[in-house]
Image (tube, coloured by chain):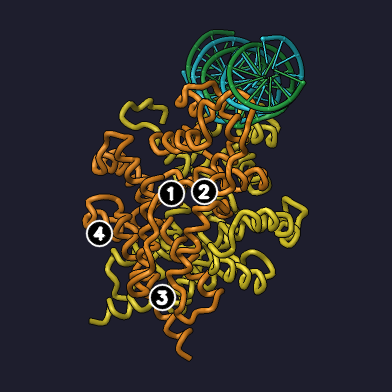
Chain colours: A orange, B yellow, C cyan, D green
Amino acid sequence: MSTESTGLGEPDRTLHLLWRERLGEPVGSRGPKQRASVDAVVDAAIAIADEEGMEALSMRRIAERLGMKPMSVYTYVPGKAELIDLMVDRSAGEQPLPEPAGSLRERLEQIARLTWNEFLRHPWLLSIDTSRPPLGPNVSDRWEWSLRMIEGLGLSDLDMDQIITLVTGFVSGPARAYIDAERLHRTTDETDEEWWERNAPILDQIMEPERYPISGRVGQAAGEEYGAPSDPERAFEFGLARVIDGIEAYVASASSP
Amino acid sequence: MSTESTGLGEPDRTLHLLWRERLGEPVGSRGPKQRASVDAVVDAAIAIADEEGMEALSMRRIAERLGMKPMSVYTYVPGKAELIDLMVDRSAGEQPLPEPAGSLRERLEQIARLTWNEFLRHPWLLSIDTSRPPLGPNVSDRWEWSLRMIEGLGLSDLDMDQIITLVTGFVSGPARAYIDAERLHRTTDETDEEWWERNAPILDQIMEPERYPISGRVGQAAGEEYGAPSDPERAFEFGLARVIDGIEAYVASASSP
DNA sequence: CACTTTCAGCGTACATCGTACGGGATTATT
DNA sequence: AATAATCCCGTACGATGTACGCTGAAAGTG
């Protein structure tokens, strides 16, 4: 139930693993051939996390998937903490990063949608504490790309940093809601209506309606409009539009005087 | 109360625990006196999570803190999952919810700062999947209060819902960064400069500067301005101002025509 | 060829976790 | 006094991450 974190492993060891492709492999190793590879381990881990969630990810399950015994995984990866860093960086490299083009609004939307897509592909990213992201090649490339999208607008370096942080940070909220709703539908056979019919009697008995007039009204309106308790995709579009409006206004006022 | 209802499963149990105070206790229990209480368990759990983080929270540690044996905790709480729901709802009730007053901007700020404070008091809230919040009394009160803060502006019910979601959702990003930075300072004896001096040589060797011109420039500018790798409190203020600007513009356009 | 060095793979073991089960101790009701 | 309910806890099970050290395969060296 508790969340995993990035950046917990040995920095030295982790960095060398993250940048292994651009560093060149150590040549002339003596022992037996490796049966697998770091990439195979990371792929297996991501596959498990995608299919069954982060709580199902264990070193033993990874080994099983690769046809090895548990301890053999440690031949490729120092531990679980470092493996998670590798998973995050690998996920960050899946989508192409197109050359900057279009209006500011279009560019910020592109950044946000890229992040959105990544969360939908790999829901487990949301159960990971990525506050201190691993400084791997793909994460770094993506950061550079994001900044390049808003380069040349007359913004200070600090403003650029804060704007990108705001846009990408915003996405996690609605993405969480989306993933959660989807998982609920997949896990249980219950429809939203059935769930509501099962819980409503208890809530009716417990929550005095006169204490929650606005929640009640808003909740009902939302339910009728969405045909569900929530519509995260819509929340994403709504929030994104507001955030970009705010940023546009700021850029206009910060670059003109 | 002792009905082993086949129709109602887990949510039933959790809801009754959450609303236990307003439901009234079952009177005339036969067995031995209880040595502790649900509140004592929840308090102990929150204390542990506050002091040592979510990963240190275990049923055994809670028992230890209460002077009982591990399995006795299950007398008060069905399991760890339910306990976490109780922790979240209890945390939501710590701060007073003042009557709505002031401009829209001031009100939205108040909502955001309340959320911000809550995350700083209880950092473990950030390592919890709160996408489907427990429908407890404090969480419900807070939701109602938030909606009441923007009632009467001519907004549709859906817009109200989405605006509150946006404002509170935004906070988690910078709060995560803040907590993480603070934890890093407390955990290690290293200053930011020492950390950088230790990692810079590796990064210099690995990351070709010509591939990351903007990141390099922005990172350096930020470092010099903040005297640290980041300044989450500033990011919070910056982002909040943008988000509210965007919402204000929307409210003006949505309520006038 | 024989011999040495190195390292992949894995068997075993340990501490820690959540919690199912069932039994003794304690109390209020009958 | 008998009965029924209920707290507390001893024991145990399966799962987790991973430390340690062995075995045998492959490469380098003579």
Determine whether the residue tagged by mark 2 lies in a helix, strand or loop. helix
Comparing labels 4 and 3, the label whose residue is closer to the camera: 3
Do marks 2 and 4 share a chain? Answer: no
Q: Mark 2 highlights which residue?
A: B88
Q: Secondary structure at mark 3?
A: helix
Using the image as rendered, state which of residue A188 and residue B189 is in the foreground.
Answer: B189
Amino acid at the residue labelled 3: Gly
Instruction: Look at mark 4 in the image and give the residue it sits on.
Output: A221
| Mark 4 touches mark 3? (CB < 8 Å) | no
Disc 4 and disc 3 on one polypeptide chain? yes
Q: Quadrant of residue B159?
A: bottom left
Q: Which numbered disc, 2 or 1, marks the residue that appears first in the sequence?
A: 2
Residue A3 appears in view: no
Residue A182: quadrant of the picture: top left
Q: Secondary structure at mark 4?
A: helix
- Quarter assignment of residue A8: top right
Mark 2 near mark 1, Cβ–Cβ under 8 Å? yes
Residue drawn at x 38%, y 55% is A96
Q: Secondary structure at mark 1?
A: loop
Q: In which chain is the residue bearing label 2?
A: B
Give me the disc on residue A246. 3
Q: Amino acid at mark 1?
A: Pro
- Quadrant occupied by the N terminus of chain B: top left
Residue A82: tell me if it is visible. Answer: yes
Residue named by callout 1: B133
- Chain assignment, label 4: A
Residue at the image point whose x is 41% and y is 80% from the top? A249
Q: Nearer the viewer, residue A29 or B191?
A: A29
